[in-house]
Image (tube, rainbow, N blue to C red):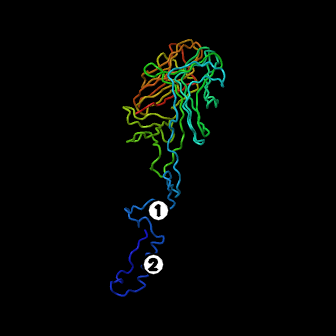
Amino acid sequence: MTAYNVISPASLVAGQPEDISVILANLQAIQGVLNGGIDNANINGAAAISASKLAGYPSDLLKYLRGDGSWQAAPTIVVGDELAHAEVTVGSSVAATTEVGADTLLTAPAVTCDGTTPVIVEFFSPVVLAPSVAAAQLNFILFDGSTPIGQLGQVRNPAGASTGTPVLMRRKLTPTAGAHTYSARAYVSTGSGWFGAGTAGAGNSVPAYLRVLRVSPIPPSVAAGSFTATYYGTSFPVSPADGQEAILVDSTTAPTYQWLFRYNAAATTYKWEFIGGAPWTQFVAAGQAVTSTTYADPATPHTFTVPRAGTYLFTITAKLPNNSNWEYIGLHANNVLIAEVQSEGMATHNGAVDAVATIAAGQTLKAMFKTDVNTVTPTMRTFTVTPIRVA
């Protein structure tokens, strides 16, 4: 601290002539403090100095002071916000056989883009079926207006029988400036395919949807422990505000999922509503035999522990062999069956289970298999979990 203390105060007596050297020494001491010697300790904590007196203080309310002393425009703090959403509750057949003439499944409302901000276009259907012809294909195409801009995915039928499977497809891109109308379309290589959707509720599939999400950066913390635009952690904020967003992860160093939620204070039970992020996914390609007439785990089991009580979408898919017996895929919570699919292994085929269920925190979800006789050896196994809303 640079402090000023009166020099030789005993020599400064009222009504008496003074030694000019004492006065000069005091003036020089004051000069030293005023000319570059003032530091934080010299300023009264209640001084309420206006921020506008800081060097380079901008008139722009959207700028902030960086640690290097410069004023910078604050980056956009909205992450994964939904720009457009369309859904249907009734499925349709797919008979088109060319990409350019593909059948339209869903069209999202038009979005206006700035030419620099990337977006994610996401398409979901609870069940699709490729044509019932060996090696037949059901192809999904993303269109911008009337122009195809890429194949989102393909479902191929390995045998003559057709098996339904859910699909969730995404593409990240940076649109040009202006309005864009995205649609999901499909065509087949032969025969006729199916695109499924439902009204949700007991015994019904959930709706199919197409949505457009904006991808924006999260600004870094200015200092350790300081504010970040979106909360990030293995739990939610203790006292959230209505509309607050938070990213839930299972690990802050090596997360296997990163789920973005928005807090809805008006919701009755599960107030954190999922608004973005990829599903938790576990994939095992190798075939692993299960010889059991009751549900059992393959050598490499599919296991997921529910982080918070809530409603989730679960999907299990696997390629099942031709072994002339009944084969089963079952979704279990703490070893209690909550959904299953049964198929007859007359030919190699795909099996799938998709379910929406409300699960308590801490329960262990498993994808398990069984057969009524002989052995079932599933390959290309995938288990995905997507939250819908949680506590």
Label 2 SS: helix
Q: Quadrant of residue 94?
A: top right
Residue depicted at x 34% and y 82%: 10
- At which x and y percent is residue 297? 49, 23
Q: Which residue is mark 1?
A: 53
- At which x and y percent is residue 67? 51, 56
- Tell me the crowding category of disc 2: few under 14, some 14 to 19, or many 20 or more residues within 10 angstroms, Cα based: few
Q: Amino acid at mark 2?
A: Gln
Q: Quadrant of residue 15?
A: bottom left
Q: Amino acid at mark 1?
A: Lys
- At which x and y percent is residue 12? 36, 83
Alpha-carbon distance for marks 1 and 2?
27 Å
Q: Is residue 97 above or below residue 255?
A: above
Q: Which residue is mark 2?
A: 28
Instruction: Report the quarter where the C terminus lies.
Output: top left
Q: Is residue 286 above or below residue 9?
A: above
Q: Is residue 213 above or below residue 352?
A: below
